[in-house]
Amino acid sequence: MKTHWKQNTTLILFLFLQIHCAATLHKTGISLERYKSDLETKSVLVEGLQWKYTERPGTSETILAVHGFGGDKDHWTRFSRHLTKGFHIITPDLPGFGESDKPEGINYTQEAQADRLFQFTETLGLKEFHIIGNSMGGGIVGIFAAKYPKKVKSLILFDNAGIKSPTPSEMQTIEFSGKPSPLLVTSPEDFDRLLTFTFVKPPYLPGFLKTYFANKSFANREWNASILKQIRKEGYFLEKLLSQIQAPTLVIWGKEDRVIHYTVMDVLKQKMKSKLETILLENMGHAPMIEDPKLSAKLVQDWILNLDRPK
């Protein structure tokens, strides 16, 4: 019995150290990535909720970048590295995600998050800026641009949610059949399937980081599922507001996106009244700013710098 107890204690200690080491390595790796991008980690209290965000100061244009479903502020870390140093960039963790507060019982729809994002910008004293969003974050910043037009100098969407695509995506087809969303991992081992579903060429992750993210994604499954349920119930909210968007808009989409089909761009062309430019990237998945941060940053930077130039 004593030997058995010692073996169990040793196993528990080993597993604890493995998890602790993975978490420590993860924090070290992320800190190094932020350091390479000149990003400082900060926090701010907004209407009772603690927001974590990264910021790189700059004297040129301000960019506010918003992550997608299940993501966090570091989805923009490598992207930020490829922007000219003068750009001022802020990338928050939305409430419910990343290191920001995750209270139960509040509304996590895209519209509710857009309103929270407005309060975040007010708290930071941001007057006018370019706003970027990917996936769910794209739906949120689109709603933000429609509801708070005076703050938005330009709107930049990466594979945005909130609009019904004329051609159903692979994810929609799966969900319509009654199967669980491909965005929710069923086990830590299922994380590789999520990566290949999201990217054409998944970004390289060292083994310890992949293990950390896989365990984290599985641990957050039920929480993420509850938020996804709210978003699904909300419907295609952004689509109703497209005609209200005044800011010039750039849309960037991965042609091989299996999550949201690129024909959403056809709806944007039909319903938006503001200046609109669309770019379809070959051999690219659902999150171009992660899959090819250098190209994505160049497209965004060129767009911003050319906005006021006469044709």
Image (cartoon, rainbow, N blue to C red):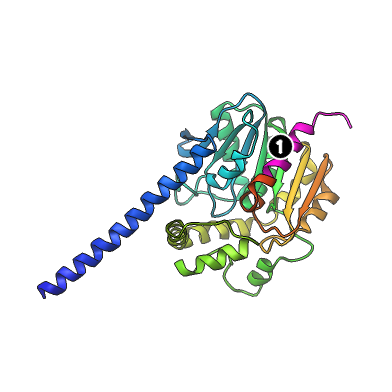
Count of numbered marks: 1
Q: Residues within 10 Å of mark 1 (few under 14, many from 20)?
A: some
Instruction: Report the magenta stretch's main SS.
Output: helix
Q: Position of residue 22 (x, y in %)?
A: 37, 55
Describe the element under mark 1 as helix, strand or loop: helix
Residue drawn at 32 percent across, 59 percent down: 18
Quarter placement of the C terminus: top right
Which region is colored magenta? 296-311
Residue 99 quadrant: top left
Badge 1 amino acid: Gln
Say above or below: 233 vs 56: below
**Residue at the disc numbered 1:** 301
In front of the other: 126 or 5: 5
Residue 164 x/y as whole percent: 74, 59
Residue 185 appears in view: no
Pinpoint residue 255: horizontal percent, then vertical percent: 74, 59
Asked if residue 285 shows in the view, the reply is yes
Whether the magenta-drawn stretch holds residue 89 is answered as no
* Outermost residue to the left: 2
Q: Is residue 306 magenta?
A: yes
Q: In the picture shown, does residue 120 fall above or below 179?
A: above
- With 193 as the anchor, is 168 left or right in this view? right
Placement of 203 over or under 55, stated as above or below: below
- Say which quadrant the N terminus sits in: bottom left
Q: Residue furthest top?
A: 59
Name the residue rendered at 42%, 50% in the picture: 26
In this picture, residue 273 sits left or right of residue 226: right
Q: Choose top left, top right, bottom left or bottom right for residue 173.
A: bottom right
Q: Is residue 109 left or right of residue 211?
A: right
